[in-house]
């Protein structure tokens, strides 16, 4: 039996990933802080990253999927913990590693300079963590740069922001000029991570559905009559510069992506 350790995986598409792996006959161990119980049929270790090595004991895994690696310090500790314990490590990263890059066409994985310095934030922490793994990992390393995730039990509240404003007749605040970005369905990113876990490629890979979306596309299918207002406190997913990813590497490696038009109406019209 193949074995996978999922760090995080207690909610949203991380839980979808755990269920997919379990149902495929994979031996899954979920490691989290215990705020949410693991689903039946998987092993569950309750700990935080600081005590991870002790909690794992002598366990080894074919693959580790890290859903909650946010900083270079997280990456350093993961390397120390999993050296000799796994042959493959998949880090869930984000489109936000491209946040400060200006482009007019979909960005390939090579657009991110591992040695660059950008303003601190979520995306920069992920980029620095990627750089640590790329330079020092003693195992095969993959970083999955996910598009903005829509659908499912989204705890971020970003899509709910639109639904609430439209239902209540309040304006959606946007830029003077608004540009498209890349998105992916919550079930699709879970499927992608499971696929990447047992593939044989390494390095960064972009994961997004075909069909970029603007803030106006997102609102088009929301029941009601959206109103838009230009302002400084812009809504989530309203982007003042182009913000799309190229998914051709993943497609060439064999993953078949959906199109946003196939699932967006259901997601925002629910």
Image (cartoon, grey):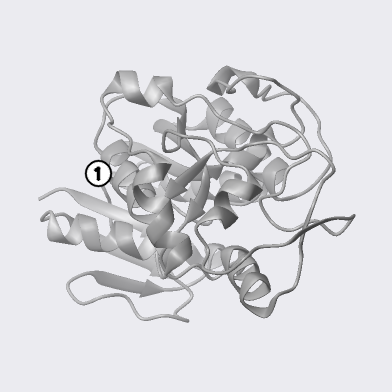
Does 87 sit left or right of 82 as displayed?
left
Residues 163 and 58: in front is 163
Task: Confirm whether residue 216 shows in the render.
Answer: yes
Residue shown at 47%/54% (left/top)?
67
Q: Could you tell me residue 256's position as x and y percent?
A: 27, 32
Q: Element under label 1? A: loop
Within the image, what quadrant is residue 84 found in? top left
Residue shown at 56%/41% (left/top)?
213
Does 114 sit left or right of 24 as displayed?
right
Residues 193 and 91: in front is 193
Task: Confirm whether residue 53 shows in the render.
Answer: no
Within the image, what quadrant is residue 197 found in? top left
Residue 55 vertical position relative to residue 197 in the rendered view, above or below: below
Residue shown at 16%/54% (left/top)?
26
Pointer 1 local density, CA inside 10 Å: few below 14, some 14–19, many at least 20? some
Does 8 sit left or right of 244 as displayed?
left
Check the image and name the residue furthest to the right.
232
Q: Which residue is mark 1?
A: 62
Q: Which part of the image, by quadrant, shows the C terminus?
A: bottom left
Residues 174 and 75: in front is 174
Residue 175 vertical position relative to residue 255 in the rendered view, above or below: below
Q: Could you tell me residue 258's position as x and y percent?
A: 33, 39
Does 101 sit left or right of 196 as displayed?
right
Q: Could you tell me residue 241's position as x and y percent?
A: 76, 33
Within the image, what quadrant is residue 97 found in? top right
Q: Could you tell me residue 27's position as x and y percent?
A: 17, 58
Check the image and name the residue furthest to the front.
225
Residues 13 and 9: in front is 13
């Amino acid at each position: 039996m193949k074995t996978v350790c999922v760090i995080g995986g207690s909610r949203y598409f991380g839980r979808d990933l755990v269920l997919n792996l379990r149902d495929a006959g994979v031996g899954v161990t979920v490691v989290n802080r215990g705020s949410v119980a693991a689903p039946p049929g998987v092993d569950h270790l309750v700990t935080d990253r600081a005590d991870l090595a002790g909690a794992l004991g002598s366990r080894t895994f074919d693959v580790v999927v890290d859903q909650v690696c946010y900083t270079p310090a997280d990456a350093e500790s993961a390397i120390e913990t999993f050296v000799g314990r796994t042959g493959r490590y998949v880090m869930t990263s984000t489109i936000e590693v491209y946040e400060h890059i200006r482009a007019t066409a979909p960005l390939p994985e090579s657009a991110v300079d591992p040695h660059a310095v950008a303003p601190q934030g979520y995306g920069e922490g992920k980029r620095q963590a990627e750089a640590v793994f790329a330079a020092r990992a003693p195992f095969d390393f993959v970083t999955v740069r996910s598009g903005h995730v829509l659908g499912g039990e989204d705890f971020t509240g970003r899509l709910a922001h639109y639904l609430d404003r439209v239902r209540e007749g309040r304006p959606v605040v946007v830029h003077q000029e608004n540009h498209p970005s890349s998105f992916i369905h919550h079930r699709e990113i879970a499927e992608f991570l499971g696929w990447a876990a047992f593939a044989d490629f390494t390095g960064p890979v972009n994961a997004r559905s075909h069909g970029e979306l603007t803030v106006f596309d997102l609102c088009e299918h929301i029941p009601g009559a959206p109103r838009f207002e230009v302002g400084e406190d812009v809504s989530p997913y309203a982007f003042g510069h182009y913000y799309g990813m190229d998914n051709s590497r993943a497609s060439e490696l064999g993953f078949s992506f959906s199109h946003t038009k196939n699932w967006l109406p259901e997601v925002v019209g629910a």
